[in-house]
Image (cartoon, rainbow, N blue to C red):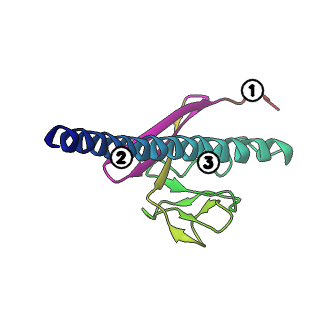
Amino acid sequence: MFVFFIGIMGIFSLLTATMRSTKGVVDNFKASQLSQEGLELVRNIRDKNWLFYQDWRTGLGSCASGCEMDYNDTDLSNWLNRNLKIDSNGFYNYETGTNSLFKRKITISQDGDTLKVKSEVSWQNETFTTIDTLYDWYNQ
């Protein structure tokens, strides 16, 4: 009976550890996607500038200290250290829904003729960072 009890406790411990590990993997995956989305939002502003024959950096110069933006926004705004919310459709934004674990900070710095964009997503004691360099490859 004792051996059976030890076996059951071992299985229970293994299942508990697996569930904790799985949640960590899921959170890390969500953070990676939110971080990538931050870069895509900045690329979208650059591309929109080209469509309207504006300087490709318009609206991207004031984020050295951090900005925030979600898919509903057309411009970057000052970073307020807010949690992203998740709405009933599963979309992350800053206005409606319930608070998620995640905060996203987008920083942009000019480096010669390029922009260095960093999208940092933090949650609990973790951070996922994605970095990209934007160019004026369209060169209008």
Give the alpha-carbon distance from disc 3 to disc 2, as whole Å: 39 Å
Q: Are circles 3 and 2 on residues that touch, CB within 8 Å? A: no
Residue that label 2 marks: 20
Q: Quadrant of residue 24?
A: top left
- Tell me which numbered mark, 1 or 3, is placed earlier along the sequence: 3
The residue identified by callout 1 is: 137
Q: Amino acid at mark 2?
A: Arg
Q: Where in the figure is residue 55, as x and y percent of width and height?
A: 74, 42
The quadrant in which residue 11 appears is top left
Tell me if residue 7 comes above or below residue 105 in the rendering. above
The residue sitting at 68% across, 61% down in the picture is: 73
Query: Disc 3 marks which amino acid?
Result: Leu
Kind of residue at badge 1: Trp
Question: Taking 38 as reference, is 126 left or right?
Answer: left
Which class describes the residues within 10 Å of circle 2: few (<14), some (14-19), or many (20+)?
Answer: few
62 and 40: which one is in front? 40
Which residue extends farthest left?
2
| Kind of element beneath mark 1 | loop
Residue located 61% across and 48% down the image: 60
User: Nearest the camera: 83 or 62?
Assistant: 83
Q: Quarter of the image containing the C terminus?
A: top right
Residue 61 percent across, percent down from the top left: 57, 48
Magenta span of residues:
112-134
Q: Label 3 belongs to which residue? A: 60
Would residue 107 be counted in the magenta stretch? Answer: no
Q: Residue furthest front?
A: 1
Residue 86: % across, % down: 58, 64
Q: In the structure shown, which secondary structural element does the residue marked by tag 3 occupy?
A: loop
